[in-house]
Amino acid sequence: MSIENNTSSVQSFYRKVRDFSLQTPDWATAIRYFTQPDERSDLTLVSRRVYGRVDEFLAVMAAAGLDSVEQEMPEQLLVLPTESQLYQMKLEAGYVNDASAR
């Protein structure tokens, strides 16, 4: 796993996803995903199951309210941004999590 070197963009992106997760009403467009026991120690499993790739673990971490990727995630309902919402948040934060694009 690699995280963007620009820590301010990482923090901004994390905050955007966290706020989205906490403030999105039940009726609004979002991905709602209930985490499973095998995902407790591996955020990339949620990323793969929700987005089809492992590199969105920071979005999962933010939605879950975790402080680090090593922190165990309890089983819970996550409110995650859709692909288009996620893309927009990344643009606004200046966050790039594709190593080849850095």
Image (tube, rainbow, N blue to C red):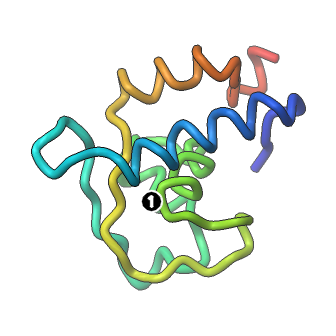
Q: Is residue 90 left or right of residue 28?
A: right
Secondary structure of the residue carrying tag 1 is helix
Residue occupying image coordinates x 44% and y 59%: 46
Total of numbered circles in the picture?
Answer: 1
Q: Is residue 71 above or below residue 3?
A: below
Q: Is residue 21 left or right of residue 31?
A: right
Residue 45 location, x and y as percent?
Answer: 49, 62
Q: Can you name the residue that lies furthest to the left here? A: 27
Residue occupying image coordinates x 59% and y 16%: 92
Q: Is residue 31 above or below residue 95?
A: below
Residue 32 location, x and y as percent?
Answer: 25, 54
Residue occupying image coordinates x 76% and y 19%: 100
| Between 61 and 93, the one nearer to me in the picture | 93
| Between 24 and 10, the one nearer to me in the picture | 24
Location of the C terminus (image quadrant): top right
Residue occupying image coordinates x 54% and y 36%: 16
Residue 82 location, x and y as percent?
Answer: 32, 33
Q: Amino acid at mark 1?
A: Val
Residue 21 location, x and y as percent?
Answer: 40, 50
Q: Is disc 1 surrounded by few (<14), some (14 to 19) or many (20+) residues within 10 Å?
A: many
Q: Quadrant of residue 52?
A: top left
Label 1 sits on residue: 46
Q: Is residue 27 left or right of residue 48?
A: left
Q: Quadrant of residue 49?
A: bottom left
